[in-house]
Amino acid sequence: MDTTPLRASRDFRLLFLAGTVFYFGAMVSYVAIPYQIYTLTGSNFAVGAIGLVELAPIIVFGLYGGALADHVDRRRLLIWTGLAQAVFTAVLAVNAFVGEPQVWVIFVVSALLTSCSAMQRPSREALLPRTVSHDQLTAANALASLGMQIGVLAGPAVGGLLVAYVGIGWCFLIDIGGLLVASTLFVLMRSYPHREETTPPSLAGIKQGIDYAFGRRDLLGTYFVDIAAMLFAMPVVLFPALAEEVFGQPQFLGLLYSAEVIGALVATALSGWTSRFHHHGRAIVVAAMAYGGFIALAGLMPNIWLVALALAFAGAADMISGIFRSTVWSQTIPESMRGRLAGIEMLSYSLGPLGGQVRAGVTADLWSVRGAVVSGGAACIAGVGLTATWLRDFWSYDSQTDQYAVAERAVREAAGES
């Protein structure tokens, strides 16, 4: 793995550590919130309703947070939204420790937390390219993904142990600690002022970002490939049914949940070659189609261990696609538009999984669990293939010759950020 950004940039190290700690704490709470709702209500619908109350904040504050990130000091926005999340999580902790926790508190605070997180993420995504040189962006995106994966893998394991042995409230305390540490690391970073005059966030500014995104076929390709993969092939909602109904081995449910993350970790650890590969469009398409293929293969496997192996390969393919998608975004989007485009990007990879859960569940009920997994993987391959055929400019994207990548490289060199 290419660790040059960690060695070369102090601010990237701080951003990497902050992201790792943030994701770890968030994933501890990710275990606690649905478990607490289920124990209080006994309703699977109530657990799923958390996603419904989070949908509107993701859309509204993701777009607004992106526009805000293109106007204010992004580092300060990271700090204040992180502290706000710590305050709201403290409310969840208090609610968990009282004698009779209130379900409505969990729903209200979850919506508030999602609003803050949606406002924060565009600033974090937009700030990363400023902390490293242009030629280190692929390696920096791979490292950032590694930090996220560490949190995603370790957080649920720790959260499960805390829920089982010391109580739900302690999960929220761990999350608060992570948010405070991450906010402190943001404080230690230097300020990155905007290179040109900015305008306050507005509907016109958000529309300008949307028009820019839809006016570039290479960006459209990254969005549609991601949506196709998540909408058609994401199998997570079917894992309980696979473990319980198909194989009769519910004790291996955790293996299914962690298999893709482990595959992604391995792919990231071996990602040094990605910095030397410049045909990013082809890499994204091939990796996304491989993801669909391995998901379909998982649905055909005769035992749960082979299912987990196929899921691990799927996770590795998805991570390769993700590294190159992030690189296209960070290498080509102008500084003045990065926040708004990061907000749009967040919508593309947030709405796809929500729709994918519905698709998978309905297909499994109308047909079968295996049929839902296999058909989803096949549909992913078809959807990505059609996207590549439709957007030929995206398939032929080359970071060394693309006009937007060349222009952004020149701007950074002129600004002394080469």
Image (tube, rainbow, N blue to C red):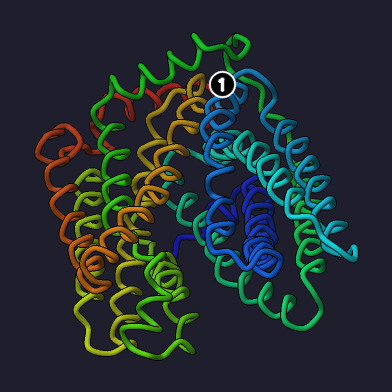
- Seen at 80% across and 48% down, the residue is 86
**Residue at which label 1 appears:** 67
The image shows residue 247 at horizontal and vertical percentages of: 33, 88
Extreme residue toward the front, this view: 42
The front one of 120 and 411 is 120
To which quarter of the image does residue 79 belong?
top right
Extreme residue toward the left, this view: 389
* Mark 1 crowdedness (10 Å alpha carbons): few <14, some 14-19, many ≥20: many
Question: Mark 1 falls on what kind of element?
Answer: helix
Q: Is residue 275 visible?
A: no
The image shows residue 318 at horizontal and vertical percentages of: 33, 59
- Seen at 59% across and 30% down, the residue is 61
To which quarter of the image does residue 186 belong?
top right
Question: In the rendered view, does 227 fall on the left or right side of 283?
Answer: right
The front one of 46 and 96 is 46
Q: Is residue 312 visible?
A: yes
Label 1 sits on what residue type?
Answer: Ala
Depicted 87 relative to depicted 242: above or below = above
- Seen at 45% across and 37% down, the residue is 347
